[in-house]
Amino acid sequence: MDKVIRVTAGKGQVRAFFVQNTEMLEKAREIHQLSPVAAAALGRMMAATAMMGQMLKGMGQKITLRMNGGGPLGTVLCVADDEGNVKGLVEYPQAETENLTPEKLNVGAAVGTDGEITVIKDLGMKAPYIGTYPISTGEIAEDLTAYFMHSEQQPASVGLSVKVNVDYHILVSGGFIIQVLPDISEEQLRLLEAKLICLPPLSELFENLNTPEAVMERVLEGFDPVITEEKQVAFHCDCSQERMEEALISLGVKEITSIIEEDGHAEIICHFCRKAYRFNEMELSKLTQEAKSS
């Protein structure tokens, strides 16, 4: 079962999030027919977005994480809310790169380093909060660590990892975000930094320990971590017939009329879940009238 846990540690001087999103990524892999390196990139992004969704403070709020470093994957995009619903896509899901080693996918090359990481927080205000920071490695975790430091002035350590089987199925996907609070002591900070530097590969931890709780105990050993909240997370797309109707209406009367004259019908496929929505000529004519009055 995929879940995210919220943790406090180090006598309240550290807060952290740990997530396992293996099932979520496997569903995305099946929907989008992802190549191994595309799955690795999307899995890391989905893990990060799931955890960042738990940082939101209000119902109905959403966070969008987008990266495009000019690599063969194009844009990698994920959206999450505070309820644990996550959706994501890769612009070119079948793209591939040469592996760094026989068992290590080259996510950095697939994402690229000529672009930005963008975080959009829809907090229910008139305008969303938008933060950006240049991509430096394309490995996602390192870029998010830099984003937190420079765009949100929040020191953080981000760890993200995906392991893909030889048959392309997802063996494990997960990660953590560890943030230190302003009043942390120098001693605690040095101990935490040393601890993180000496960790074994994160995919190895998740594969061997099997749960985010066990990974938390290993990563924050000696810091007395306490779980304050846990929540199930899953791939969930909130597309609907009504949203697709709104999308068609936004095209305007002229464009809808052109579709009726040329095709007599329309089909819209959701980019996130690949569900198809079909509109016949009568339904399109009705939307034309709604577009006139909007």
Image (cartoon, rainbow, N blue to C red):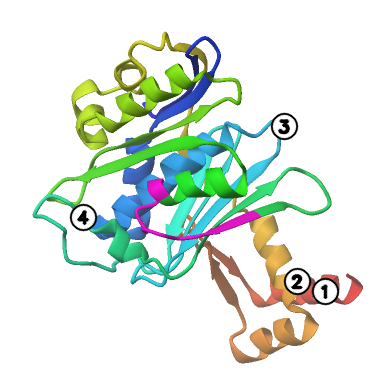
User: How far apart in space, not on screen, are marks 1 and 4 (Cα)?
Assistant: 48 Å
Would you place residue 8 above or below residue 81 in this image?
above
Q: Which residue is mark 1?
A: 291
Which contiguous range is marked in magenta?
A: 131-142
Distance (Cα) linking label 1 and label 2: 5 Å
| Contact (Cβ within 8 Å) of mark 1 with mark 3 | no
Q: Nearer the viewer, mark 1 or mark 3?
A: 3
> Residue 17, position in %: x, y?
47, 27
Q: Residue at x 52, y 27 (%)?
A: 180
Q: Amino acid at mark 3?
A: Gly
The residue closer to the viewer here, 189 or 87, is 189
Q: Earlier in the sequence, mark 1 or mark 4?
A: 4
**Badge 4 or badge 2: first in the primary sequence:** 4
Q: At which x and y percent is residue 265?
A: 60, 78
Q: Amino acid at mark 2?
A: Ile
| Residue that numbered label 3 is attached to | 58
Badge 2 is on which residue? 249
Q: Secondary structure at mark 1?
A: helix
Disc 1 to disc 3, how far (Cα)? 33 Å
**Distance CA(mark 4)–CA(mark 3):** 37 Å
- Distance from the alpha carbon under mark 4 to that under mark 2: 43 Å
Q: Which mark is residue 105?
A: 4
Residue 97: give x, y in percent of width and height: 22, 67
* Circles 4 and 3: CB atoms closer than 8 Å: no
- Please name the residue shown 53% across and 49% down the image: 147
Name the kind of residue labelled 4 in the image: Leu
| 3 or 2: mark nearer the eye | 3
